[in-house]
Amino acid sequence: MTRPLRKWLLAYAVAAVIFAGIDAVWIFTVANPQYRSQIGHLLPASFNAVGAVLFYLVYVAGIVHYGIRPGDARATLRSRAAGGALFGFFTYATWALTAFAVLKDFPAVVAVTDIAWGAAVCAVVTALTAVILRLNRTRSGTQPARN
């Protein structure tokens, strides 16, 4: 396995754990109650675990590619976090604004909340992952990239 691939996979694993943890807290404390009260009539009777797993697998790859960018040694922590925030903003906006446009009675508050969450969570996941990777490089004795 090449070094760039190892770096990418490590970034993916770290980001996946962080994103899953933060998103689980968000889902149980904010999203689920809001969805039940605002769009409960659109929710299925049971949770689709396959859809959720597929989302996380694909989405974390996007965070790594557009936010963390483990192969870009010149990227700063700020530029990485900004890339993550933009990725989250545009991807969550795609879902939320499409739902707002095509679903009957889809509330604007849900769309706005989701878009803000997407930008925030991706910025935080990107920043935390980048810091952890930098600390790991420092601890292992390799030269840390500029973050």
Image: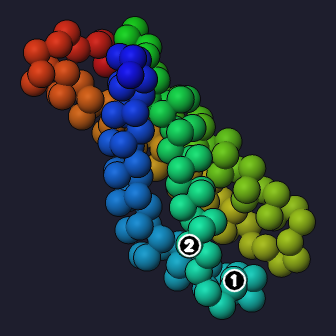
Residue type at the position of mark 2: Ala
State the residue at coordinates (60%, 56%). 55
- Seen in the picture, residue 7 relative to 54 is either above or below; the reply is above
Q: Amino acid under label 1?
A: Leu
Instruction: Give the class, few, some or many, for how many residues have Cα within 10 Å of label 1's Cα (few <14, many ≥20).
Output: few
Residue at position x 79%, y 73% in the image: 106
| Residue pointed to by mark 1 | 43
| Residue nearest the viewer, comparing 5 with 30 | 5
Residue 116 in sight from this viewpoint: no
Disc 2 to disc 1, C-alpha distance = 14 Å
Residues at badges 2 and 1 in contact (C-beta under 8 Å)? no
Q: Is residue 48 left or right of residue 26?
A: right
Q: Which residue is denoted by mark 2 in the rendering?
A: 49
Residue farthest toward the front in the current orientation of the protein: 1
Is 143 displayed left or right of 110 in the figure? left
At x 66%, y 91%, the residue is: 45
As drawn, 50 above or below 11: below
136 versus 113 height, above or below: above
Q: Residue 20 in the image: state x and y as whole percent.
A: 41, 58
Question: How far across and how far down the image is residue 72, in percent?
Answer: 44, 14
**Going 24% across and 34% down the picture, which residue do you hit?**
132
